[in-house]
Image (spheres, rainbow, N blue to C red):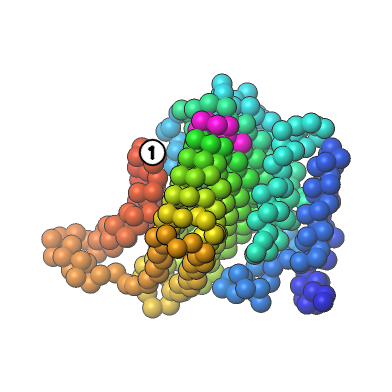
Amino acid sequence: MGLPKIKADTTTALLANLVLPKGAPWADAVRAAALARVETDGLPFRRDEYWRYSNPEGLTASAPATVAPATEDDAFAAREVLTITFVDGVLDTSLSDLPALEGVEVDTLATALSEDDHWAKDLFGTLEAKGQVPVQRPLAALNTAFAYSGLVLRVKAVIETPIKIVYRQSATAADAFVRHLIWLEEGASLTLLEVGTGAARFNSVTEVEVADHAAFHHIRTQGRTADRQLATHMFAHLGQESLFKSFTLAVDGRFTRNECVIEMTGDDTSAHVAGVAVGEGRDFLHDDTIFITHDAVNCESRQVFKKVLRNAATGVFQGKILVKPGAQKTDGYQISQSLLLDEDANFLAKPELEIYADDVACSHGSTSGAIDDTALFYLRSRGVPHAQAIDLLVLAFLAEALEEIADEDLADDLREQLTIWLKR
């Protein structure tokens, strides 16, 4: 059975404007396989099950997006970090701290994919292809086929200094495909920070291999560019007694879809994915789509997402916990909540549990509500101005998600940044 005409036409039109990058034969084969998946499955559209709450037309249009470049705030500007900068999706070495830290091997994506025997051969496209089942993720496959710039990191030790990736935009009409590959060897650890959006329309994929006893901490901000269109995917595979923690703070934007696909195959593993989104206006749509698979014993996962919405803004959460046979003593927790600051805002949630083991503790919950009038009255009666009282209650509502950040100093940076953004 062929693709629906609208889907086939959209896919053909977009692919006609793109050119496959060239590299080593193995990389070209991975790209060709990804392109075949896109051609077979088609780009997403509204009738797809996992896109029925979000309209992907802005991400799949053949014409490039147009957004005026804007300066975005850097919540981590005061931190000692190693900074790597991308401009319009392309690495800018003049704005980057290269070479990298001791214990971290750094290559560009172009370099890694041009070599016949690079370690990236075992990672590039592997987790993305596996993550296409049972849910198709065509925008990720599109990235595998066409991404031309990104970082390839091999972490061999415990790295105390965070690596910060900054995404800047300079061109008004800028489409970007960015791909990162990260391999944490046994016992290694890394904190990766990401700041900015970097293009009018931005498609990024990160594949992360976390070996036994390794730890990966990821924190990003997606700043205040009002008309940005953003699709990100993070695919992770976790080994025994490993740790994966990812947190996203998003404010404003026209369309944002953040997907995270995690497979836990090592015993005693922990995966935490959390996020905060704040937006207003009919054009604002923010979508978090998470899929966590438990395929080992005594593993823990947490999904904690909070959204603050007003003036007809829309928030979406789609989260799934899959517990495979034999994954006993699984502890899976999922919560998605929205604070609706007026009657026009919308929150759409699809929490899912699929469990094939009998010794588990899994739960999910989703709620929407308005500001607590009693709490607001309490603050106002003690002389707190109305706008400040609202901000305090918003921060209190978001606290559970921010507590998922392991580094308290970095968490404080985000609280301060969020306070600034709310005041605006």
The residue depicted at 32 percent of the width and 72 percent of the height is 370
The residue depicted at 80 percent of the width and 49 percent of the height is 31
Q: Is the residue marked by circle 1 packed among few (<14), some (14-19), or many (20+) residues within 10 Å?
A: few
The residue depicted at 35 percent of the width and 39 percent of the height is 408
**How many marks are shown on the rendered structure?**
1
**Left or right: 341 as drawn, with respect to 179:** left
Residue 236 shows up from this direction: yes
User: Farthest residue toward the top?
Assistant: 102
Image quadrant in which the C terminus is located: bottom left
Which stretch did the figure color magenta?
183-189
Q: Position of residue 8 (x, y in %)?
A: 80, 71
**Left or right: 94 as drawn, with respect to 8:** left
The residue depicted at 79 percent of the width and 47 percent of the height is 30
**For mark 1, what is the residue?**
407
Residue 340 shows up from this direction: no
User: Farthest residue toward the left?
Assistant: 382
Q: Is residue 248 above or below residue 109?
A: below
Q: Is residue 307 above or below residue 202?
A: below
Image quadrant in which the N terminus is located: bottom right
**On the image, which quarter does residue 343 sit in?**
bottom left
Q: Position of residue 221 (x, y in %)?
A: 49, 48
Q: Position of residue 214 (x, y in %)?
A: 51, 35
Amino acid, disc 1: Asp
Front-lying residue, 327 or 292 = 327
Can residue 113 be found in the magenta stretch?
no
Q: Secondary structure at mark 1?
A: loop
Can residue 188 be found in the magenta stretch?
yes
Q: Position of residue 398 (x, y in %)?
A: 35, 57
